[in-house]
Image (cartoon, helix red, strand yellow):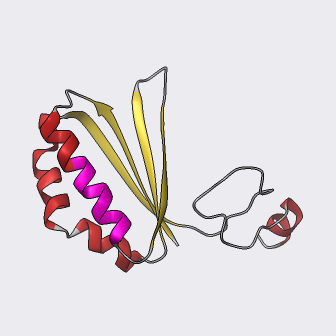
């Protein structure tokens, strides 16, 4: 599994941005291998971060190479005041089942399982 974390400083969002953003969300969700996403805002820094979860790197690359995503990358400076992207491979995912998570479909590991498999 893979993640693509998009962290950015919010600029001026207009209707054009919202329409393009929504189109990209729908495209991502339609790609086989899209597992979900999480987003939050840092109240201190004002940065917004969204983590997208993917079953395969090929699925993520389908979004990256989609014309709407390319359009957004070319026009991003109009709407955001800086960004950083991290693409990473997920080595483990575990929890106690107490919260919903896009990767919760993977087997739950206990802390002992995590520590012994490192």
- Please name whichever residue, 84 or 11, is drawn nearer the observer in this view of the structure: 11
Residue lying at the far top of the rendered structure: 44
Residue 58 point in image, percent of width and height: 36, 79
Left or right: 18, with 97 as reference point: left
Which quarter shows the C terminus? bottom right
Q: Is residue 2 magenta?
A: no
- Please name whichever residue, 102 or 112, is drawn nearer the observer in this view of the structure: 102
Q: Which residue is drawn at 18% across and 49% down?
A: 20
Q: Up-down: is 30 above or below 4? A: below
Instruction: Quadrant for residue 69, please give it.
Output: bottom left
Q: Is residue 23 magenta?
A: yes
Left or right: 79, with 117 as reference point: left
Left or right: 79, with 3 as reference point: left
Magenta-highlighted stretch: main secondary structure?
Answer: helix
Q: Which residue is drawn at 40% across and 24% down?
A: 46
Left or right: 74, with 84 as reference point: left
Residue 105 point in image, percent of width and height: 65, 70
Residue 26 point in image, percent of width and height: 30, 60
Residue span colored magenta = 21-30
Instruction: Quadrant for residue 19, please give it.
Output: top left
């Amino acid at each position: 599994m893979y993640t693509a974390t998009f962290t950015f400083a919010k600029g001026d969002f207009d209707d054009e941005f919202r329409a393009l953003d929504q189109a990209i969300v729908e495209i991502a969700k339609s790609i086989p291998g899209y597992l979900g996403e999480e987003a939050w805002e840092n109240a201190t820094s004002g940065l917004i971060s969204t983590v997208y979860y993917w079953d395969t790197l090929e699925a993520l690359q389908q979004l990256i190479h989609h014309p709407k995503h390319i359009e957004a990358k070319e026009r991003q400076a109009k709407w955001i005041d800086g960004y950083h992207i991290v693409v990473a491979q997920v080595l483990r995912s575990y929890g106690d089942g107490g919260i919903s998570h896009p990767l919760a479909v993977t087997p739950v590991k206990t802390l002992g399982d995590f520590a012994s498999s490192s």
